[in-house]
Amino acid sequence: MARLTVNGKVLDVEAEPDTPLLWVLREQLGLTGTKYGCGIAQCGSCTVHIDGAAVRSCVRPVSTVGPGEKIVTIEGLSPTGSHPVQKAWSALDVPQCGYCQSGMIMAAASLLASTPDPSDADIDAAMTNLCRCGTYNRVRAAIKAAARGDAKAAGLSILHADGSTT
Amino acid sequence: MTASISRRRFLAASAAASGSLVVGFHVPLSGVASAQGTPSPEVNAWVVVHPDDTVVVRIARSEMGQGTLTGLAQLVAEELECDWSNVRTEYPTPGQNLARKRVWGSFSTGGSRGIRDSHEYVRKGGAAARMMLVKAAADQWKVPEAECVAAKGVVTHRPTGRSASYGRLAPAASRLPLPTDVPLKDPKDWTIAGKRVARLDTVDKTTGAQRYGIDLRPPGMLNAAIRDCPVFGGKVKRVDEAAAMRRPGVRKVVRVGDSAVAVIADTWWHAKTALDALPIEWDEGPDAGASSAKFADVMKAGLDAPDAAVGNRVGDARAAIAAAPRRLEAVYSYPHQNHATMEPMNATARWTPERCEVWTPTQNGEAALAAAAEASGLPLERCEVYKMLLGGGFGRRGAVHDWVRQAVAIAKEMPGVPVKLVWSREEDMQHGRFHPVTQCRLAAGLDAQGNVTALHMRISGQSILAGVFPQNVRDGRDPVVFQGLNPPGPESSIGYTFPALLIDHAMRNPHVPPGFWRGVNLNQNTIYLECFLDEVAHATGRDPLALRRALMANHPKHLAVLNAAAERAGWGKPAPAGVHRGLAQAMGFGSYVAACAEVSVTQDGRLRIHRIVAATDPGHAVNPQQIEAQVEGSFAYGLSAALYGECTVRDGRIEQANFDTYRILRMNEMPRVETIVMPSGGFWGGVGEPTIAVAAPAVLNAIFAATGKRIRELPLKNHSLKRA
């Protein structure tokens, strides 16, 4: 039995102490937005926040997360997609297959919380997540757009269904 | 505790995952007609309009990130004259397609064919629906159809100004016969297609709401993890089931075929850890001693073999080379690689003696259905496949559905219970369908002025078709081997004219199963040809662009993209200090592509790829901003291959097991990409794959310019770029 604080809710889960947090989130709590990609902290698809820090949940035993530590998953970042990072992602049509994007967004949100106007080097250092579709350049543009609150500056020229453009 | 998900929520989640955002979801899942509401009638197979004017466009091809879902919807909406902001999409099932005499055509999503193979009939689907809606209005108003116009989802009777929305007209339209003569718009009149439209599937991919196959959690589901014999062709000899049964949550240990063992448990983590702890003894079979090094020798021998299948022949190249005053020769090679989709292979299956259902990410729903039927022992019409959005495909999820067969075999052990099989990354990495391995010897005959008078490319190595569709190999000839090297034609032709030319292939197949890997054989063929031409240019003191231009006079479309990339990059003008350029061009998947790469290499050998300018002529550009995304992504995929991509065989098995040993490009290594989309009209080319082919050779040629080092064996990680 473990007590966790996930997306603002205190929850008790049944899991062996060495179960990675990823599988508790996905299988016990049904929070499937956090993805399995490698299981060895290489790809970052499983990135969540623990007290604001980006953490690769696939190698984090659930027993090492205290009941008072605040876990935030992609579902808790903003369920409506209104977090500035999510808005920038939508404005610039960042995702392709989308599978790695929860982890990308969580890593980016954590970076921007600590470094509000990151340089390219800051982005390179923080964003080590793997994307097989190759969205990296749009991820970088969206992080900068989110930092400045201006998606148009990325110059991608995208027509949205509501008639707006970015 | 287990979060409870009701049946209805599961069905709704399946609907959302399968691309349908429509409220009155009416594609039957598990025999349940509709999750909520009453079904709206379809106007025709491609178009459903709900009373609230929501337009549902049916999409037969699979969305795996490449944007096909949006592009095809644009083409239908263009002809339908509906309001784009009201457009939603859904997948018909392969079972429905069969039941309706394949009204949606092919479900196959590979070879960059999603749009180029179906643009005509999907546009006709949209246009026919529009004609039926207009006729429904005219009939209702008792006026001539010619006096009615359709725009933005509304039919208006011009003389009276009377109007009705598609949502109101749809029930009557659905009862009309399908029109037979369906004219299409001239692409120059497009207002939705051809535009830089945002994707329809973005928002859910930013909130975690998007469901992939791996995310399914139907009520009562069990989970399975699997281990196949690490040596291809091997078998299970002995397994101690009792060891796994003692572990928490384990329900059953099953043999899958004669080569694999699966553990079924309450959670996947329980299944996976029990499998890890399970002692399995293998009979490794006849290929237990195979290795990459041994197979390299087999391919090397094929470079000199007298028998080879011919792909392209002009004149007598061998004689011309033998007689040439000067000759140049080089041998290149390209390794096995894994697709490494970010979402590992998975499928959820439920089997009863009467029915088999499978939910899976697949590039070809009909092939998945055939695999499910075969594994289930039930006739096709008692089986169904529900396509889930793919967490990457790249060719892995199209031709061979090995994971679907496994999932069904496992589900048969638990009748009536949905079982989700998920491969671990290690299983996925070591049981792929790998990029074929080949070598190529290129020999050029040069005249006294350094002009190429003859070229011979001898390819030796693996055939994809021999492993996947052997019935398509005739007399030892696999036509797909020659991608990008073919005589003039609409699919994948060589962009140069040589006075004499011979391109032939000595087929040599290892025991490693091959697959169609994004870009397929265009990848290595373009490296071979484009790097060797660069060698010729340097050996003869020519500018690499000038040499190509001289050979491309008869290939204006190839030349146009090359010129565009070279000019935008500033070829012939000074590059920034320490930066060097390289070029490559190719034609494949119906499109013309070229790239100019800018790199620098430090004295101690550190490579930085700064910028790539890429040009694409796909004939018609259905969504230019999505083409740009595909071109950018192609460089990430192609540069991962060039820098790191290699699966090696030792003791009959793939050595790499995860992303620590099978590296892929990260963000800090991704160059700036400038994309020129230059559709010249008159043909329809694909965009998901061709650009991958120019990534590696453009960079390799730039590395030569920077260092004088010619890399002929991929990947780059095995070479030092350090200068003495």
Image (cartoon, rainbow, N blue to C red):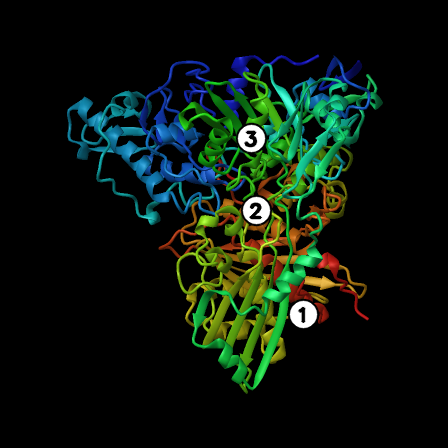
Q: Which residue is mark 3?
A: B203
* Residue type of the residue flagged with mark 1: Ala
1 vs 3, front mark: 1
| Chain of the residue where label 3 is placed in the rendered structure | B
- For marks 1 and 3 on the same chain, the one whose residue lies earlier in the sequence: 3
Looking at the image, residue A17 sits to the left or right of residue B224; the answer is right
x and y percent of residue A161 in the render? 46, 33
* Residue type of the residue flagged with mark 3: Val
Q: Nearer the viewer, residue B616 or B305?
A: B305
Quadrant housing residue B141:
top left
Quadrant housing residue A39:
top right
Gap in Å between the C-alphas at discs 1 and 3? Answer: 44 Å
x and y percent of residue B128 in the render? 28, 35
Number of labels in the image equals 3
Are there few (<14), some (14-19), or many (20+) residues within 10 Å of tag 2? Answer: few
x and y percent of residue B213 in the render? 57, 29
Gap in Å between the C-alphas at discs 2 and 3? Answer: 20 Å
Above or below B296: residue A109: above
Q: Which mark is residue A155?
A: 2
Task: Determine the residue positioned at 38% across, 14% down.
Answer: B38
Same chain assignment for discs 2 and 1: no
Quadrant containing the C terminus of chain B in the rendered view: bottom right
Q: Which mark is residue B705?
A: 1
| Chain of the residue where label 1 is placed in the rendered structure | B
Are there few (<14), some (14-19), or many (20+) residues within 10 Å of tag 3? Answer: many
The answer to whether mark 2 and mark 3 are in CB contact below 8 A is no
Quadrant housing residue B392:
top right
